[in-house]
Each structure stands twice: as C-alpha cells, then as structure tokens.
Amino acid sequence: MPHSSFVPAAVNCANHELDFSRPLVMGILNATPDSFSDGGSYYQGASLDIALVLQRARQMLVEGANIIDVGGESTRPGATPVTQTEELDRVVPVIEAITKELGALVSVDTSCPVVMREAESAGAGLINDVRALRRDGALQAAAQTGLPVCLMHMRGEPGTMTRQQTYPDVLTEVHEFFAQRLQACAEVGIAPGNIMLDPGFGFGKSLEQNLTLLRHLAEFQRYRLPLLVGLSRKSLLGKLLGREVSERLPGSLALAHESVLRGANIVRVHDVAATADMINVHLALQSGRGEKETKQQ
Ligand code: 8Y4
C-alpha cells in the first residue's frame, strides 16, 4: 500500500499544489541573526543579505526541495523573543524574493497573526505554526488567508517547554491536543482539507517520548491529514549519539527514513540533497517499481 493512501491526493497552497503521492521535502531557511543549526547566517551585521538567502533557496530547490520554510523567530529555549516588527522585517522580504524570483512554494514559520497576513500578501503558500494557532487572533488570521496550515504539538511555550515533560502518556497527550486544535479550526471555518499535523519532535519532549512518538507515527494517519515531521539535526540525536549539530546528518537521515516508512508526507530538513536521495531510494523499493529491470539482470 502506498504510504500516502490515507491523505488527500493534493493540497492547494496559493498558486502551488502539493502532491502527496510521494514524500515531500521542506527545506529550512532561518531568517534569524542568531541561528546556529543550519550552518549559515544570511546576516551581514544587522541586515539580511537577500542575495545570500536567494542563493541558499535556489540551491535547496535544485537539490529537490518542494517547499522552503522561512522563519524569523528563534524557538530555541532561552532565545530573546522577537518583536512583531522584527519578525516582519526578517521574513517578508525573504518570502517576496523567493516567491517572485524563484517561483517556489514558501511556508512561513510564524505564530503571529500579522505576520501570517503579511506573509500571505508577500506570496507565502502555507502557514507553519509551532504554536498551532493558539496566539490571540491566529485562528482568525489563518482562516482569513485561506492558506493551508500545519498544526504542531507543543505544550507551553518554547522558553518553558523543556520543564514540561511530565505527560503520563505522550501519545494520548498529542492526540488530545490535535483533537482540540482541529475543533478550534473547525469553529473558525478552516477546512479540514487545509490542515496538516505535526507531533512536534523535540518540543518539550524527552528522548524516550520522541522515540515513542516516532515508533507510533503511523497511528497519526487516522486523521486522514498530511503528516509533517521535523527531526533534522535535533538534540535527540545529540542525546542518542553524542554528536554535535554539525555531525548529525547520518542520524537525521535515519530518522527521516523511519518517518517516511511510518507515513510522513513532508519532512522538514536542513540537508535537502541527502534527504531527496533517501526518498528516491525509498520510492524505488515501493510496490514493485523497477522489478522488471531487476529480473533482466
Ligand atoms: C538543531 C537543529 C537544533 C534543529 C535545533 C533545531 C519544527 C518546526 C522547528 C518541527 C514544524 C528546530 C519551525 C526547531 N521545528 N516546524 N520548526 N515541525 N512544523 N530546532 O518539528 O529545527 S524549529
């Protein structure tokens, strides 16, 4: 059975269509001056270098990214909270450049209602909210844009979540959270066909809880909604392997592969080329593809 048989065939993101007949790659682009995880900062002193950003986005597209995820807020515990103006200044020019110059599908990684609206005007096709539209006015703003949304599980806020790892059962916790957020979306008229779900790996979860969620990822197919997962270079790999952020590619690929085997429809990653290779190998081994060629050898 193809991995994607449980979800809508496609979702419309502004003028792009996401085709879920195969796993898709979301490439991470941090428009923050303090990002440490993706190896590159696109800042020259205080200002963002759009040419550098475009170069990185173009590279990820050539490598096989289907979506570029643009974020202007650091969710790292202890990071200084960004103001709305700062966040707008960071992401709007980047979204405009990538959509207009490269014609690519951009998701905006934001929890802020004003940023959602401005990002949509700038050409974004998808809202990726790690707070699952829980900020004041976010549900209404997302509904008004008409864009698809990704609802991610996180208990509490990025600054406090590391202290809140006391769920009796992480699977029940995430399922109850999804049920509650889906209800909230229904109440403001966000169509189920415009929703994706994400268990929020690494957000206030222990190593064991992250592993439990991944082992049971296929159970989240019951919602019949596209599943997005973000595991790339995350600290569970630090705990599991004792590796620094820069040494986590093999572990990240294994986690992305395990996710795809359990039905992930979109993987959010730093290393697009390697992940695209992994997916192509996975697809070659799916449901009889390439059998004829093998027999002739
Ligand atoms: C090294 C590498 C250290 C990565 C920290 C990190 C997700 C997400 C993030 C996710 C969705 C991150 C915006 C955290 N994670 N959005 N965003 N799902 N939908 N940390 O898992 O990558 S940021």
Image (tube, grey):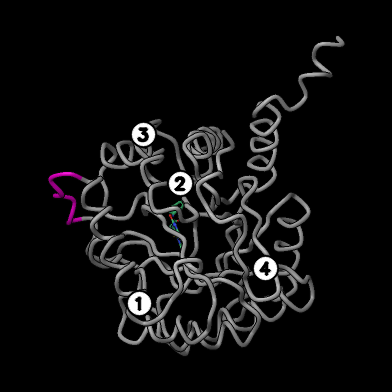
Q: Nearer the viewer, residue 77 or 141?
A: 141
Q: Earlier in the sequence, mark 4 or mark 3?
A: 4
**Comparing labels 3 and 2, the label whose residue is closer to the camera:** 3
161 lies above or below 250: below
Residue found 23% across the figure and 66% down from its top: 156
**Where in the figure is residue 220, as x and y percent of width and height?**
38, 47
User: Would you call the spot at circle 2 few (<14 residues within 10 Å), some (14-19), or many (20 or more)?
Assistant: many
Q: Which residues are magenta?
A: 163-169
> Residue type at mark 2?
Leu
The reply to whether the residue tagged 2 has its Cβ within 8 angstroms of ligand 1 is yes
Tell me the tag on residue 105: 4
Cα distance, mark 3 to mark 1? 33 Å
User: Would you call the spot at circle 1 few (<14 residues within 10 Å), some (14-19), or many (20 or more)?
Assistant: few
Q: Which residue is mark 3?
A: 215
Cα distance, mark 3 to mark 2? 13 Å
Q: Earlier in the sequence, mark 3 or mark 1?
A: 1
Q: Which residue is mark 2?
A: 231
**Comparing labels 2 and 1, the label whose residue is closer to the camera:** 2
Q: Which residue is mark 1?
A: 81
**Comparing labels 3 and 1, the label whose residue is closer to the camera:** 3
> Residue type at mark 3?
Arg
The reply to whether the residue tagged 1 has its Cβ within 8 angstroms of ligand 1 is no
**Where in the figure is residue 105, as x and y percent of width and height?**
67, 68
Tell me where residue 100 sits by quadrant.
Answer: bottom right
